[in-house]
Amino acid sequence: MTRASPALETVRLETTDGFATITLNRPEALNAFDRAMKTELLAGLRAVERDRSVRALVLTGAGRAFCAGQDLREPFGGEHPTLTDELRLRYNPVILAISRLSKPVIAAVNGVAAGAGCSLALACDLRLAAEDASFVLAFGRVGLVPDSGATWFLPRIVGQARAAELALVGDPVSASDAARIGLVNRVVPSESLLDEARSLAVRLADGSPLAMALTKRALRYSADASLEAALEHEAALQGIAGRSKDHEEGVAAFRAKRTARFTGE
Ligand code: LHQ
């Protein structure tokens, strides 16, 4: 059964088969971020974190774009927030909520991902791109610096040299080039993007929720850690995983040659 969350307008949140889909829903503005959409996206992410029946998340855009970044029609300065305030209050919490979400997040990039929309895709754990998707670090074109985590994620995903090229030159990257440089995990035909994302989400949702959460934590920790610290952190997390019912179930299923049924305990 599919459950939809009616309280949200600028994003859609649906839950089915153990995973949730959040769809950015301002197609007339290529899903550009206005204040309402940032607030509602954060609310949606928090709802996904709370819902124990949800074990993975797909993030996508309505219409022909994934997300065109900041809504450039929205005013800044004067009585309105500064860009610094906007980042601290609205964008950064969204990026942290995705990165800290205890469930894997798949960006199903259905079209252009520009500016903060590109940052949003970068913050996700996995990226599937439609053939006609593209990625634009559009910040420089409007006299801004990459934000919403782009300077942190990009070099870690594609390396310093490519990150510098994407951020400084700012040319659009096609889906096939994005796959070639490791910016996306896979390119799929546009008409099957959501089916592919959903079947990946179902596979992730069938895994151990505890192992998924701890794996995300370990990968995130290792990005800032020495090898020594990462080894110690892995050992500590493995202690937690090793005491879980999911580990017991995984081993029992292996021995019985059957599929494991994980509960997250
Ligand atoms: C838009 C937008 C948009 C509003 C298309 N806003 N309407 C910034 C400030 C504050 C705090 C924190 O961080 C940031 C970070 C950022 O995100 S800076 C980067 C902001 N984004 C951009 O600079 C991208 C601007 N958009 C574009 O370059 C193009 O629209 C792209 C390449 C995304 C798509 O091009 P096309 O496929 O040719 O579509 P289009 O340009 O014709 O746009 C279609 C409609 O969407 C159009 O509206 P209209 O009423 O004329 O049909 C655009 O005005 C609207 N739209 N992006 N960001």
Image (cartoon, grey):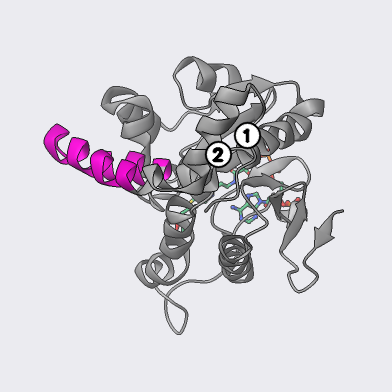
In the rendered image, the vertical position of residue 99 relative to residue 49, given as above or below: above
Nearer-N-terminus badge (2/1): 2
Q: CA distance from mark 2 to mark 1?
A: 6 Å
User: Hey, which residue is sitting farthest right in the picture?
Assistant: 1
Q: Is residue 200 left or right of residue 211?
A: right
Q: Dot 1: few (<14), some (14–19), or many (≥20) neighbours within 10 Å?
A: some
Q: Residue at x 31, y 25 (%)?
A: 159
Please give the count of numbered marks on the rendered protein. Answer: 2
Q: Which mark is residue 260?
A: 1
Q: Position of residue 90 (x, y in %)?
A: 47, 68
Q: Position of residue 63 (x, y in %)?
A: 78, 45
Q: Secondary structure at mark 1?
A: loop
The region drawn magenta spans 215-239
Q: Secondary structure at mark 2?
A: helix
Residue at the spot of label 2 = 249
Disc 2 marks a residue whose amino acid type is: Glu
* In the image, the residue with mark 1 has its CB under 8 Å from the nearest atom of ligand 1: no
The quarter of the picture where residue 60 lies is top right
- CB under 8 Å between discs 2 and 1: yes
